[in-house]
Amino acid sequence: MSNAFKKFIRAVTLVDLFKGLALTGSVWVRSIITPRQVLVTRPYPEVKRPAFPNFKGHHGFLLNEDGSLKCVGCGICAGVCPAKAIRVYTEEGKDHEKVVVGYEIDAFRCIYCGFCQEACPKDAIVLTRLYELADYDNRACYRWKMDRLVEVGKKRPLFRDEVNL
Amino acid sequence: MVTTRSTLRTQEMLLNMGPHHPSTHGVLRLILRLDGEVVEEVFPDIGYLHRGIEKIGESLTYKQFIPYTDRVEYLASMNVNHLYCMAVEKLAGIEVPERAEYIRVIMTELNRIISHIIGCGALAMDLGAFTPFLYGVVEREKVNDLFEMTCGQRLTYNYMRIGGVSQDLPEGFVEKTYAFLEEMERRWDEINRLITENEIFVQRLADVAVLTEADALSYNITGPNLRASGVDWDLRRDMPYSVYDRFDFDVPIGKGERGTVGDCYDRYLMRVRETYESLKIVRQALDGLPEGEVQAKVSKVFKPPKGEVYMRAENPRGEMAVYIESDGSTKPSRIKFKTPSFNSLGVFNKICRGQMLSDLVAVIGSFDIVLPEVDR
């Protein structure tokens, strides 16, 4: 009976309501005094959070110091890719060596697992910290050709507006 | 308990709940036979999210299948990663370095915490309390940042490897995790103050859809849902895998604090209390984190011996198990997942009979089902 009486008192005095309001109010005040840069909810286009160094974002193609491709066209990345997103096109060169003529990543298929980066014996392909993948050109958006990958690899940009793709 | 079966009988009605109902936690269609507002029968219609992951596994190598295990259950990717890697290691007899085992435990327990945050928050949201979910997501975001620091992904981590983990913990991870644990304990208290003792919340959950101990055992319910029915069984304690035998933690059991043992409120409470236990485990694992290698030597062309293996692990939703059959080649010849949410869905028809239609939302939320895991 006393339990029911307690319940009644709590219901009449609206204790639960005010307890809840006190808590939500304190969280609201906390969200105001926290600086915008470290708030969990950021006003995105104005405040951009750089990804962590390990982040697996847009692929980039690295060059040697003399400007030639690091990639030798071995095709291991295409082999380990679980989503079969990578295509490597090679041709026979003048001295019967392998020449990479094309490299293509299907952005729709890629699951950003990072196996290509781990498997590459020459460290030619990396997953950069660029996570803004939207594009005005619909073709370029899902078929990432060599020039686009080289462009990203050169700059290793943090955000899309730092690179002209 | 409110008597839900009235003496007045109305015309029977078939009603579809879903597949796009917001509170079915994914794409689930429940076909309901209703008598007025009282549920007579529930037929869960599953398969909307079937992607054939088990079949895909047969065409990929053992290592290549790891990213796909993330997608079996997206709210607890680390746990499924861990389970699959443990199974392959058992099959091939690979010894995992101690540091890697500790890192795995830290990761799986952090993932269990954020999974329970979503579980409790989504239940509250289904019942009309939006705030706990938002507060919970703030904490989840911090763990997501920790995961992003470590493995570069925020949802599908692909962190574990056969024989270890993909990379060592980055600098500052341990300190940030300690900070998170302290913060999380306070915030979780706060979130609970909002709903756990809230009279409206308790009234919606207590005595609703009681799952008895016998039913839970016969329907093969596992995890927090089983413990809510009063069965003292936790795989981490009773059949320890990885390094769980070195940690000291309690296993909460449903006692029917506000109603009957095994009602929705008990299932909710289990998740709340397990979060505290997971925090304890993470703290102990961080304290005892040894130095050393994080990856065992595994040949590049990985070929486990011929045979089969069955491995199970305690996931946030219950015991998940994987069966792998190897024919000695680089690709598994059969992979099968046993998933806990599938069993939870099976018992719906039994326990929802005679409940009100509006309580069904609470039942779905309290079982914390994840549909991709049901359909694979």
Image (tube, coloured by chain):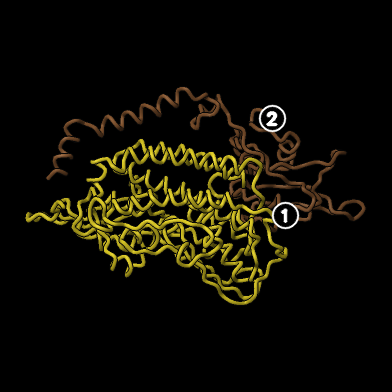
- Image quarter for residue A82? bottom right
Q: Quadrant of the C terminus of chain A?
A: top right
- Type of amino acid under label 1: Ala
Q: Nearer the viewer, mark 1 or mark 2?
A: 1
Residue B174 locus on image (x, y percent): 60, 44
Label 1: chain? Answer: A
A66 or B105: nearer the viewer: B105
- Establish whether labels 1 and 2 are both on one chain: yes
Q: Which residue is mark 1?
A: A119
- Give the CA separation, mark 1 to mark 2: 28 Å
Q: Residue A164, which numbered label?
A: 2
For disc 2, the neighbor class at 10 Å (few under 14, some 14 to 19, many from 20) is few
Residue B13 locus on image (x, y percent): 18, 55
Q: Residue A96, which numbered label?
A: none
Residue A72 locus on image (x, y percent): 81, 51
Question: Is the C-beta separation of discs 1 and 2 under 8 Å?
Answer: no
